[in-house]
Image (cartoon, rainbow, N blue to C red):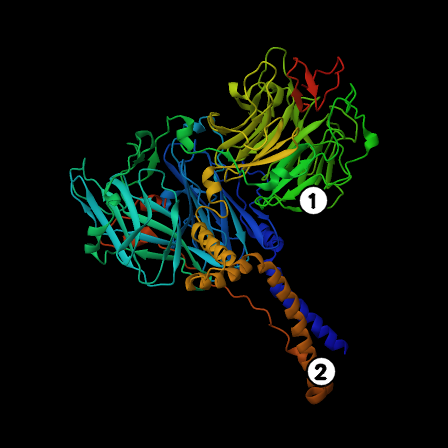
């Protein structure tokens, strides 16, 4: 019987290992850390490329390893190997690039990068085998977003094993200071199978000839679609400098439906389709490129050199996983006659302002075969640089405004975009809170008994979980690191804490001495905020109301350095503070920015050294800037304070271009009013939350476009599903009969919803039940065999046959279409230069009856040896 137990234990461990271990990002991380090549990267510091996010998800950071391009129009490439052998799915992209230095980025998937160096000149190509474009980022262009439940499949037997990042540095004047660039993209990958798989469909003209001097020349492409349905959610156009407009359509029963239309002289990123387009069996896909031959003295052909042209229309789509194909191509025109019915818009060039025009070709000293795309530096006002339609408004139906909260002191967003609130419960910072030596006077109240940290669903504002009971006296700042840990400050305790997000009450790390104000490396005096570098792990603390400094610690809590001093009377110099109240890390630019509250400005520094870089100050700020938050992509958000008596500047929130510091938009709530907006936090998609310490309120703001389609991302499948759902609901409420089509779709929707929301439950249940059933079956079988056939030899025979159960299978992945190889196979075509282009206080409120401060934070008189904090 002991042998039976041993055998069952061995089989259980084998099954558990094969079912679970390979999916653990922790094991993936260790394997990747041991095997991945080490990149020399001055910007990334600790070089944590792979970050586990959950049991099934991980983030992969793909960045240039601290490069300094020496001349304009430089193309640099680098590669990163996929850290897993099994199938994985890329479900989101987060760019890290500044439009001041980077013209565009492309991310490819392939199996054989063109070099194994840390980085290389892309003149040598990106990949030696077939490659797929997975992502494109261009200055002034929207980011690529995948709909929920959609992912690019990588790894496994067929997927790409490597990611290759290509970065085009347009104007290198920004590198005069010889700084290192770490532009790139962070991928969110998951081991969970996605119901929909993303892919690329390339429509490309091969035989177009553009006569010299011809005003309008059309290049037409058309193919019949004979596969399972695909859903289009983004598109990209590409020509050289003779292209005027590129348009793509679905043709069904003679009806032309626009997929996308864009000028190829604008940033050549992937743009979301305005309306969802489904392509079914029997449809025709058609595209037209409109060229001009004006200015040419000879014929222009399709090719990859600077004197040639191209006509490409990329379609990014998703399909059901069981039918998915990663890439498709169309290089013919199967029905030239159909284009007599093409919509007239395809023949009308899109006007492009000169300062936004794409300039194609190298400078004179470059070799003639090179072909690049360069966009001139913009010279317009800031609103036009980023987006003429950028604006923010309150989400007036968001129910979170009605939450019962104490003074709201801190806000943050976790990795799932959930809103995290830090509030003071029944405690209030008022004139009785501290004495003249900043000693907290209300210890007798005890710590706040209710949960001070609330995690909210960003849409419904439902409280998902809470923590922070009996820990804090006067909460202030909140931030969340890349591992999901909470970093908080308590101005009464004069301390900073690192807390686990799982609700554990004991701090993981503590800074300062409880209830003891001070100014050395072991003490703080009313610290205000914390920022944790997601790459290096370094910790930055703003300290605070009675100190004027930024303190830097190592990831394990060791003091490194500090900088800052109190502001001079009548003059504010760089590096001087009057209440450094809020911090934000500007990862795209490698800067740490501080809301210098009482000086009414934002100061930015190099986090490594504390070196001052720049100041952002506006008359609209008034006398105070309370909080600041950076959103990847170049946007900086801030809130000011309530005006002093006699001042006319209103209290409001600001959206700014970080590069120039110019204000793009200001916004205020429609429900209630700002009184003391104490903190602000912004997401990648410009969803903004503001917390107020006087009204005890949190508001949600977003762009009008996002509010219109806020149920899912704009690039997804929102509109039709919403309309269908509304029709079903209306039919049920009014007892109207539903159409057969709606009935069929209604039957399908619960399955889709269950697959998206309940997959983890099903997976866990299955993994728990299967081993039990298997073990019971094996036990019964072995017992029967022992007694009926083998007798005493049964256990020995089982042991001898148990080897070799596990096996490892690997397959060489395919890829996409390599345009260089494709053209190289055609007679008379030169590949040279092709690869690059073609794949391109106290928180305080002013008393309006007089000019004195009615304190809500730090209202006590100050000792003569310590300067006033507000």
Q: Position of residue 120 (x, y in %)?
A: 42, 42
Look at the numbered disc 2 and give the secondary structure of its residue: helix
For the point 59% across and 41% down, the residue is 399
Disc with the residue nearer the chain's start (2 vs 1): 1
Residue depth check, mark 2 versus mark 1: number of the one nearer the observer: 1
- Identify which residue, 356 or 715, lies in the foreground: 715
One can see residue 774 in this view: yes
Which residue is pictured at 75% across the width and 27% down the height? 523
Residue carrying label 1: 466
The image shows residue 669, relative to residue 311, as above or below, that is above
Q: Residue at x 69, y 47 (%)?
A: 502
Q: Position of residue 18 (x, y in %)?
A: 61, 65
Q: Residue furthest top?
A: 570
Q: Which mark is residue 783?
A: 2
271 or 703: nearer the viewer: 703
Whole-percent x, y for residue 47 in the image: 57, 42
SS class of the residue under badge 1? strand
């Amino acid at each position: 019987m002991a042998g039976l137990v041993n055998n069952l234990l061995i089989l259980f461990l084998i099954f558990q290992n094969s079912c679970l271990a390979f999916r653990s990002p922790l094991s993936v991380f260790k394997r990747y850390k041991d095997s991945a090549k080490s990149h020399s990267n001055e910007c990334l510091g600790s070089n944590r490329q792979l970050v586990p996010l959950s049991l099934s998800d991980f983030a992969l950071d793909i960045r240039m390893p601290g490069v300094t391009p020496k001349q304009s129009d430089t193309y640099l490439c680098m590669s990163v190997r996929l850290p897993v052998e099994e199938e994985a799915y890329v479900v989101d992209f987060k760019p890290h690039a500044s439009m001041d230095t980077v013209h565009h980025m492309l991310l490819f998937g392939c199996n054989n990068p063109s070099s194994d160096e840390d980085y290389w000149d892309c003149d040598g190509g990106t990949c030696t085998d077939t490659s797929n474009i997975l992502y494109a980022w261009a200055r002034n262009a929207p980011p690529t977003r995948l709909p929920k439940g959609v992912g690019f499949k990588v790894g496994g037997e067929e997927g790409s094993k490597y990611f290759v990042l290509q970065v085009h540095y347009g104007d290198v004047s920004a590198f005069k200071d010889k700084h290192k660039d770490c532009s790139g993209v962070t991928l969110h990958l998951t081991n969970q199978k996605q119901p929909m798989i993303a892919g690329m469909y390339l429509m490309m003209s091969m035989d177009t000839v553009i006569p010299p001097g011809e005003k309008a020349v059309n290049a037409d492409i058309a193919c019949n679609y004979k596969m399972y349905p695909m859903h289009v959610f983004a598109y990209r156009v590409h020509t050289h400098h003779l292209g005027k407009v590129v348009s793509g359509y679905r043709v069904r029963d003679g009806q032309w439906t626009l997929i996308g239309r864009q000028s190829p002289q604008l940033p050549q990123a992937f743009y979301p389709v305005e309306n969802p387009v489904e392509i079914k069996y029997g449809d025709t896909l058609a595209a037209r490129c409109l060229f001009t031959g004006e200015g040419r003295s000879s014929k222009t052909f399709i090719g990859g050199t600077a004197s040639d042209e191209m006509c490409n229309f990329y379609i990014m789509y998703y399909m059901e996983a069981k039918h998915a194909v990663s890439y498709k191509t169309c290089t013919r025109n199967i029905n030239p006659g159909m284009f007599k019915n093409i919509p007239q818009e395809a023949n009308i060039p899109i006007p492009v302002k000169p300062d936004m025009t794409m300039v194609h070709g190298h400078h004179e000293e470059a070799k003639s075969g090179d072909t690049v795309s360069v966009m001139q530096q913009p010279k317009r006002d800031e609103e036009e640089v980023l987006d003429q339609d950028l604006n923010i408004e309150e989400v007036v139906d968001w129910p979170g405004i009605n939450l019962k909260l104490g003074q709201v002191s801190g806000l943050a967003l976790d990795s799932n975009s959930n809103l995290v609130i830090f509030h003071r419960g029944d405690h209030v910072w008022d004139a009785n809170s501290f004495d003249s030596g900043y000693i907290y006077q209300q210890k007798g109240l005890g710590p706040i008994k209710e949960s001070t940290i609330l995690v909210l669903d960003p849409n419904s504002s439902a409280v998902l979980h809470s923590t922070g009971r009996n820990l804090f006296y006067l909460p202030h700042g909140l931030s969340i690191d890349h591992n999901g840990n909470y970093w908080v400050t308590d101005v009464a305790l004069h301390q900073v804490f690192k807390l686990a997000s799982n609700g554990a009450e004991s701090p993981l790390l503590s800074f300062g001495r409880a209830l003891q104000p001070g100014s050395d490396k072991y003490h703080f005096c009313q610290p205000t905020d914390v920022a944790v570098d997601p790459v290096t792990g370094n910790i930055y603390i703003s300290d605070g109301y009675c100190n004027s400094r930024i303190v830097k610690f190592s990831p394990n809590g060791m003091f490194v350095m500090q900088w800052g001093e109190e502001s001079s009377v009548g003059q504010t110099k760089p590096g001087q503070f009057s209440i450094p109240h809020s911090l934000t890390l500007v990862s795209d630019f490698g800067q740490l920015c501080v809301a210098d509250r009482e000086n009414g400005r934002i100061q930015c520094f190099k986090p490594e050294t504390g070196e001052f870089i720049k100041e952002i100050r506006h008359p609209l700020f008034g006398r105070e800037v309370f909080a600041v938050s950076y959103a990847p992509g170049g946007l900086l958000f801030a809130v000011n304070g309530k005006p002093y008596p006699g001042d006319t500047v209103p209290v409001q929130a600001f959206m700014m271009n970080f590069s120039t510091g110019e204000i793009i938009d200001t916004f205020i709530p429609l429900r209630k009013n700002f009184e003391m907006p104490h903190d602000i936090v912004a997401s990648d998609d410009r969803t903004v939350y503001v917390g107020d310490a006087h009204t005890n309120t949190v508001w949600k703001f977003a762009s009008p476009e996002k509010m219109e389609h806020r149920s899912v991302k704009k690039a997804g499948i929102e509109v039709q599903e919403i309309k269908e759902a509304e029709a079903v609901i209306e039919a049920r409420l009014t007892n109207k009969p539903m159409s057969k089509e709606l009935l069929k779709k209604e039957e399908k929707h619960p399955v889709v919803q269950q697959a998206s929301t309940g997959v983890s439950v099903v997976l866990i249940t299955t993994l728990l039940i299967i081993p039990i059933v298997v073990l019971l079956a094996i036990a019964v079988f072995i017992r029967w065999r022992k007694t009926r056939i083998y007798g005493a030899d049964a256990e020995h025979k089982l042991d001898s046959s148990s080897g070799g159960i596990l096996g490892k299978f690997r397959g060489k992945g395919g890829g996409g279409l390599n345009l260089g190889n494709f053209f190289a196979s055609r007679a008379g075509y030169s590949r040279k230069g092709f690869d690059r282009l073609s794949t391109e206080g106290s928180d305080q409120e002013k008393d309006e009856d007089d000019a004195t401060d009615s304190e809500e934070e730090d209202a006590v008189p100050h000792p003569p040896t310590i300067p006033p904090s507000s």
